[in-house]
Structures are given as C-alpha cells and as structure tokens.
Amino acid sequence: MIDFEKRKTVDVIIPVLNGAEFIEGCLESVGNQSYPLEKILIIDNGSTDSTKRKIFKFKNKNKKLKIDYCYIQERGPSLARNFGIKESRSEYLAFLDVDDRWRPNKIEEQIRLFNTSKLRNLGLVYNQVEIIREKVKVPTFPKAKLRGYIFERLLLGGNQLTGSSSAVLIKRECFEKCGFFNESLTFGEDWEMWLRISKFYTVDFVNLKLTLINWHSQSIQNNTRRGIIQDLIILNRFYKYEQYSPTDNRINCLKFLRRTNYKILLNLSNEEEVLESLKKIFDLQRGIIFSLSKIAIIPKIFGKLGWI
C-alpha cells in the first residue's frame, strides 16, 4: 500500500481545444483517481465552443478538486502542455488529452512503480493502453515493452513508447534537465520529448491497460501522412545532433523506414504534393537518399528531386 500521508505530489495537465464533447468524461476520470492529486491544470488552447462552461460546471460540482483553468491563444498542444508545466509545482506530472480517459488506479499504479522499480535514475513511467473506437480504421498501438535506457531503441523504432502522452507519468526534473515539448512540431512532439528524456533517464512501464485512447474521426493521430512527415523531421534532427557516422546514419535510417509504412505517403497524395513535401522535409546526405530509394520509396520520385 502507498502511504498517502507521505505521498509524492502529482499535477495533471489537460490541453484542450474545442473539447466540449469530451471534457466532462475526461475530468471525471481524473477526479476518480484513487491517488490524491495536487492540482488539475486545464489549458484552454483557444476554444470557441462550450468547453469553458462545461469545465466550470464540473468545477462547481467538485469543489474538493483543485482545478485551475487557463485560457491562451490557439498555438498548438505543445505550447499548451508547456504552459501547464511552467504553472505546475508538483514533483510528478501527468498529461491527459481531452478525448482520452484514465482507469481509476492509473496514477496510483505508476507512483507505486516509481517507488518499487529496480531501475536507477527512473524518469518516466508509462502503461498499456486500450482503444475506444468509432467506425474508423484503428492502427496497432505499441504494447508496453521498453524499459531501462531505451534511447537507441526508441530512435530506431519510432514512437513505440505509448502512442499517447496520456499514458505517461514524468518526474518534473526531466523537463528541467531536458527542456519542454518542441512547439515547432505539430505531430510527433511526444516522441521527440521521450527521446530527449530517454537520453538521460531510464524508463519503466506498468503492464496494465490504464489509459483509454479515444480513436475517432477527429483524432489528430488519424492524419497518417502528416505523422510520417513529422516523424522523419524528428529522426533527421536527432541524427544531426547525435553525430552518427555516414554509415551508421544510413543504416539507422533504413532500419527506421523498414518499420514505417512510408508508401502510405504516396497513396494518400498525388505525386506533386509528395515531391513538395519531400523537398521541405529532407536534409539528408546523398548516400542515405540513394539507399532509401532502393528500399522504401519509388526511385523515380528521388530522381525527379535530383537526389539519385
């Protein structure tokens, strides 16, 4: 049992933009946590619907919960999360997307693992997820299996950690050391953050489905083409900073793209749009492009770009 009298403090950060349809269920799942929470920070990223009214309705009915509501101009989920991090004061931070839900024991199980894990320098704990779906195609979310120092595996395998920031609990010190979410990214910003954290801290997971991911037609994760582009941008940035040799760089890129159905990009767009996107996102060496063209992408695309 966890001694709640000597408990570690936890703040929850909820970014929201026009989330009136989901906000009440989201807040109920936070309010039902078995582990006492210090504060719930709701960062309204420019909502124009009834989100604010529903938040205050919930707040007035649940006065025992400390809920802070902050309204900012719409500038993306990363800025909203960062705003929440800067406003928070607790030792541990959890994030919940407005359309997702938590099981009542989510935070308690993660704190328990922080207290009992044999891993040194533990900075992030995540859990298995369960998908709530509409009549839309749902991808396979990664099963929790990575633990320890996972930077290399996370870099080569893509965002295998959780598939959602709603499944993590993170020590505040991780953000103090590694920085905040990258506000220039509109997709994959969680993967990029986990990569930076995993360079300095170990990671562990609770083998329970404690987070419910609501997969619906409006989910940002449904935008497969944009997701692939952002993944490649992130991958390229880390290769620059990691100072891999050209050979290692090429091999690692190939390993990554074997795990990524990059041909989806060609199927979802006409050729001219693909060419324009590739011109914007690639800053790789010619040797890498030559190798990639043989495995992952139609060679004539690269030929038109003058890369092979």
Image: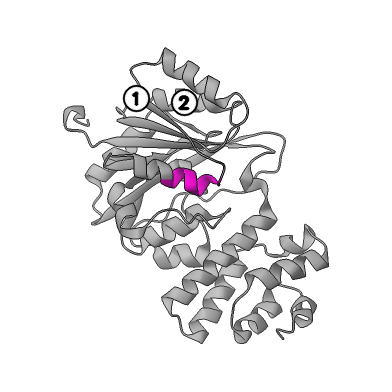
Check disc 1 and give the amino acid type.
Lys
Q: Nearer the viewer, residue 72 or 251?
A: 72
Q: Is residue 92 above or below residue 241?
A: above
> Residue lying farthest top?
61
* Circle 1 Cα neighbour tier, 10 Å, few/some/many (<14 / 14–19 / ≥20): some
Of tags 2 and 1, the one toward the viewer is: 1
Magenta region, residue range: 75-82
Disc on res. 27: 2
Q: Is residue 223 above or below residue 13?
A: below
Q: Which residue is mark 1?
A: 66
Give the residue displayed 71% in from the left and 39% down from the top.
136
Give the residue displayed 63% in from the left and 73% down from the top.
282
Give the residue displayed 59% in from the left and 66% down from the top.
232
Q: Mostly what secondary structure, the magenta segment?
A: helix
Q: Is residue 127 visible?
A: no
Q: Secondary structure at mark 2?
A: helix
Q: Secondary structure at mark 1?
A: loop
Q: Position of residue 38 (x, y in %)?
A: 29, 30
CA separation in Å, label 2 and label 1: 12 Å
> Residue lying farthest front?
73
Q: Is residue 216 visible?
A: yes
Quadrant showing the N terminus: top left
Give the residue displayed 43% in from the left and 80% down from the top.
243
Q: Position of residue 217 (x, y in %)?
A: 70, 38
Q: Position of residue 12 (x, y in %)?
A: 38, 35
